[in-house]
Amino acid sequence: MLDPRNIGALIGAASADATIGGAYMTDKRTSHLAKAEATLIEVLSMAPRHAVAHLILGGVEIATDRAVLGIEECERALTLDRNLADAHAHIGLAKYLIGRGTETEAHINEALRRSPRDIYAFRWLVYVGFAKVQLNADAEAIAWFLRSVEANRNYPIAHFALAAALALLGSLDQARAAAKAGLTLDPMFTIRRFRDGASSNNPTFLAKRERIYHGMRMAGVPES
C-alpha cells in the first residue's frame, strides 16, 4: 500500500494511471484517468507548487475533454519549472484536440528544443503527425510518424497512425505492414477502442479524426 504522504510514490502512481488511460491500452480508460486525477489533487493539496503534479494533471484534463483547463495547468507547471519540456508537448496536443492543429508543431518543436533526447519524444512526434492529418497534410504526417517509430519501435499507436496515413496516401502494402507491426505489439487494439478514447468533442477534431479511422480500416486494423 502506498504511503499516503509519500509524494514521489503518489506522483508515480498517478503517472502510471494517466499513461494507461491516455494511451489506448485499456477499455477502462475513464477509471484510470479519474484515479490519476484524484491522486494528483491529493498531491497538490500537500504540495501546491509541485510542477510535475501540475503537468500530469494538465495531461489528464487534456485527455478528458478539458483541453483549455489542461493548457492552463501546463502553463502553471511552466511558471514553476520553465524546463518542463513535456508541458510544451501537452499544450501542442491540446491545440490539436481543439481543432487548432496548425499550432501543434511549434509547441512540439519547443519541447524538442528543450529536451531533444527526451524519453517521451516518441509520443510528441505522434502528436504532430495527428495534427498534420487534421490539416490533410498526409505526407508530412507520415514523416512525423516514422520519426516516432524510429525513436521507439515499441509504441503501438505510432504504427497504427503510420498505417492510417500511408493508407490515406494509397500506399496500401506499406500501410498493412505498419498495421501488422502495431497489432504484434498490441493485439487487442481496435478502431472502436481508438474511437472511444477520443479526448475531445470539438467538431473540427472529430470530423478530421474520421480520416484516421478510414485509413486504419483500409490498412486492416480490426474494427472491434
Image (cartoon, rainbow, N blue to C red):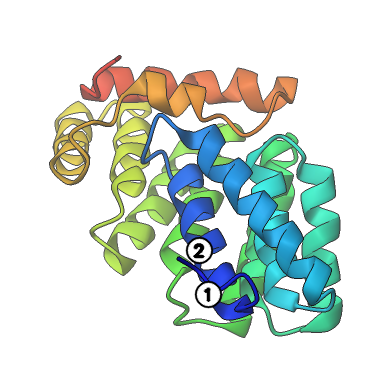
**Residue 224 in the figure: left or right of residue 35:** left
Residue 206 is tagged as none
Q: Viewer-proximal residue, 179 or 75?
A: 75
Quarter placement of the C terminus: top left
- How packed mark 1 is, by other alpha carbons closer than 10 Å (few <14, some 14-19, many 20 or more), is few
At which x and y percent is residue 184?
A: 13, 42
Rendered residue at 51%/43% (across/down): 32
Q: Viewer-proximal residue, 100 or 54?
A: 54
Residue 47's place in the image compared with 158, above or below, is below
Assign a secondary structure to mark 2. Answer: helix
**Residue 132 in the figure: left or right of residue 170:** right
Instruction: Check disc 2 and give the amino acid type.
Output: Ala
Residue 114's place in the image compared with 214, above or below, is below
The reply to whether callout 2 and callout 1 are in contact (CB within 8 Å) is yes
Residue 93 is at least partly visible in this image: no
Residue 122's place in the image compared with 145, above or below, is below
Q: Viewer-proximal residue, 172 or 37?
A: 37
Quarter placement of the N terminus: bottom left
Residue 9 is tagged as 1
Tell me where residue 100 sits by quadrant: top right
Which residue is labeled 2 in the image? 13
At which x and y percent is residue 179?
A: 21, 35
- How packed mark 2 is, by other alpha carbons closer than 10 Å (few <14, some 14-19, many 20 or more), is some
Task: State the CA–CA distance, disc 2 to disc 1.
Answer: 6 Å
Tell me where residue 217 sits by quadrant: top left
Instruction: Check disc 1 and give the amino acid type.
Output: Ala
Assign a secondary structure to mark 1. Answer: helix
Tell me how many marks there are.
Answer: 2
Rendered residue at 36%/62% (across/down): 147
Residue 89 is at least partly visible in this image: yes
